[in-house]
Image: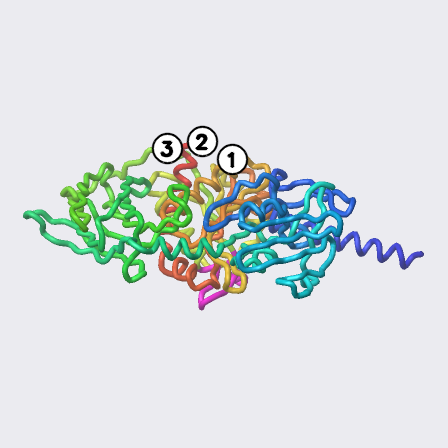
Amino acid sequence: MERRKIIISLLLVLSLLISYSFTNSYAENENNYTNVLIDGQEHSLRKIPIIINGQAVNLASPAFLYKQNTMVSINFIEKELNAQVKWNKKDNTIIMKSEDAEIVFIIDSHDVYINGKKSRIPSNIVPLKLADDFRIVAPLKYVSEVLGHRVEADRDIVAIHITTKNGENKEKNNQVGINKANEIKMEKINGKDAIVIYNSKTPSTNIMKLKNPNRIVVDILNSTISNGQEAVYDYNLGVIKRVRTSQFNPSSLYNLDDKVVRVVLDVKEGVSDPKVDIINEGNKIIIYPSTYSEKKPETPPSSYPINHTIFLDAGHGGKDPGALGNGIKEKDIALAVALNTGEILKKHNIDVKYSRTTDIYVSLSDRANMANNSNADAFLAFHCNSFNGNFKGIETYSYPGSAKGAVLAKCIHDSLIENGVYTTNRGTRTANFAVLRETKMPATLIEMGFIDNPQDDKILKNKQDYLAEAIAEGILKFLDSN
């Protein structure tokens, strides 16, 4: 009897540890869950967004995660994956037909017939189930792949991305007639100094002015960079100090499958309202920057009173290197970007406090205490992700239930997306991280990329200034909104 009590106690402790680990890493809003009746038991299951050919799908009945399998209604498979689906209630079978395959499933069985040949659904995959006593749900990844579609899941199965066979062909067809941004040069045109962007076709553009720091963005639509490489041009011309080009990852401005080349004209310090004429002439985009006096104001202009304080927390440090990858350490990247961000904020008359400014170890509780004692208006922790080299992108966290923390996270995350300083948009999330939980002010934690991913590695190594500029801009937007 005593032994049984010990075992039960151990199981309870293990259950609590597992629950805490999950909550600490991947805490979600309650709205992200759905109640589903399976095998006579009600489960609260996490909803899973579905993205097909780059477009989010509006689901009549939510997809959900059940035993690490994303399950969807068979109506979804019929509607979105263009399969003919028939439910034979007499023998409890589901028949799915596509152009290339016919699959016969048996509800609650791992037996399956593919093109007439008997097979077995792998044991780690849940078979088709009757949910809520009226709908059939199926394992999305397994069914999609048997039907010939490509399926990818984010880390922790945050979302499922499906590329259909037709979607692949459509993407290839969309490449036909696409513009290529070939090169950028400084030239004299009609006696005026100009920056010229040469294209393979007549370009269509979207032009924006952005602040903090001041810059002008020229998005070249339906376009790719000819050599596929990002570039920085130190063209010191008029109000422009530098030109940057990259293949922009579409955000809320565009559809996910749009091809956009982003050209950023960085404006010189001290220029509050840069004047630039941008003309499309044939296959060329001609940029005429206005002239600029090099004389700088004695006092940097600022719209923020000195009583604004921001606390910047560079993650890890000292004996704790954080994540490792590609010859770099998370603690070094976090510190470099935090210090750069602080310097930008100081130019806007903001008092900046740090958890560390050198390579020292600071405990999580000390970080929170330092922030609380600083009476800061906002707290930001800098971190990098790591996960077997196959995942990439940025994600920004706030503490569950913190409304202002969520606003801060969104301001910073949106600024990073808007500035194109990322590979994949992994969204804003909530988590029970100690520095978010124990701080009294609005707080956020930014994962600036996966340190072990080659694409993110380039950003973390070579674009620390751009990361800092985008993060500082997000903080300033937050201060403007509060």
Q: Is 102 above or below relative to 20? A: below
Please report contact status of discs 3 and 2: CB closer than 8 Å, yes or no.
Answer: no
Task: Look at 50% across and 59% down and name the residue there.
Answer: 391
Asked whether the viewer can see residue 213, the reply is: yes
Please report whichever mark, 1 or 2, sits nearer to the chain's N-terminal start.
1
Q: Give the x, y percent position of residue 320.
A: 54, 61
Residue lying furthest right: 1
Of helix, strand and loop, which one carries label 1? helix
Q: Which residues are magenta?
A: 316-332
**Residue sticking out furthest to the left:** 191
Query: For mark 1, does the 10 Å Cα neighbourhood hold few (<14), some (14 to 19), or many (20 or more) residues?
Result: some
Q: Is residue 368 above or below residue 359?
A: above
Tell me which label, 3 or 2, sits earlier in the chain: 3
| Mark 3: amino acid | Pro
Residue 326 falls within the magenta-colored stretch? yes
Location of the C terminus by quadrant is: top left
Residue 482: image tag = 2
Q: Secondary structure at mark 2?
A: loop
- Mark 1 belongs to which amino acid? Lys
Q: Which residue is mark 3?
A: 305
Q: Residues within 10 Å of mark 3 (few under 14, many from 20)?
A: few
User: Is 338 positioned to the left or the right of 67 in the image?
Assistant: left
Asked whether, in this view, residue 458 is left or right of residue 60, the answer is: left
Nearest to the observer: residue 69 or residue 339: 69
Mark 1 or mark 3: which is in front?
Answer: 1
Report the mark closest to the observer, 3 or 2. 2
Q: Residue furthest bottom?
A: 327
- The residue at 83%/53% (across/down) is 9
Q: Residue at x 17, y 51 (%)?
A: 195
Residue 404, which numbered label?
A: 1
Q: CA distance from mark 1 to mark 2?
A: 9 Å
